[in-house]
Amino acid sequence: MRPEPPPNVTLGPMAPHIPADIYRQAGGRPFVIVQAAPTPTHSARSYAGPVAVGLGIALALMGFVAAALALFEFALRTAAVVGSLTGPIGVGLGLKIFHPKSK
């Protein structure tokens, strides 16, 4: 036979893990369950190595991207300089070659 809950007590999802005998011993009085935090299995020092390796890889990738962008910018500037220098020469040669000689 299931005993009736004490008055002014709401049963619900707040503490469904309370054993019945402890609940009966409380007699309607409020009680607090203190649960100790589990001890950490790994110290913060054990995470330092993988974090350092990950940061090193991230910095290396950022360096590679920066180097690739610098090389790409250098190639674009070189192409722009060569194009600007050959533009007038190319136009002059084109006019000289394709200009009709007979008038």
Image: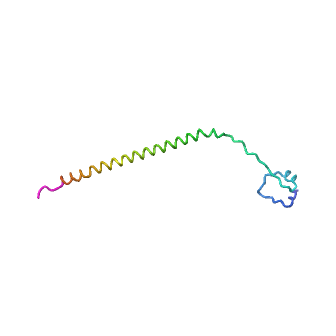
Total number of numbered labels? 0
Q: Residue at x 39, y 45 (%)?
A: 71
From the top left corner, tell me how far across and down residue 86 is, in percent. 26, 49
- The question of residue 73 being in magenta is answered with no
For the view shown, which residue lies furthest in the left direction?
103
Nearer to the camera, 97 or 86: 86
From the top left corner, tell me how far across and down residue 9 is, in percent. 83, 59
From the top left corner, tell me how far across and down residue 80 is, in percent. 32, 50
- Give the quarter of the figure containing the C terminus: bottom left
Q: Residue at x 72, y 42 (%)?
A: 39
Q: Residue at x 81, y 52 (%)?
A: 32
> What kind of secondary structure does the magenta stretch mostly adopt?
loop
- The question of residue 101 being in magenta is answered with yes
For the view shown, which residue lies furthest in the bottom direction?
8
Q: Residue at x 53, y 40 (%)?
A: 56
Magenta range: 98-103
- Give the quarter of the figure containing the N terminus: bottom right
Q: Indicate the colouring scheme.
A: rainbow
From the top left corner, tell me how far across and down residue 83 is, in percent. 30, 50
Q: Is residue 75 left or right of residue 64?
A: left
Compared with 94, 68 (above or below) is above
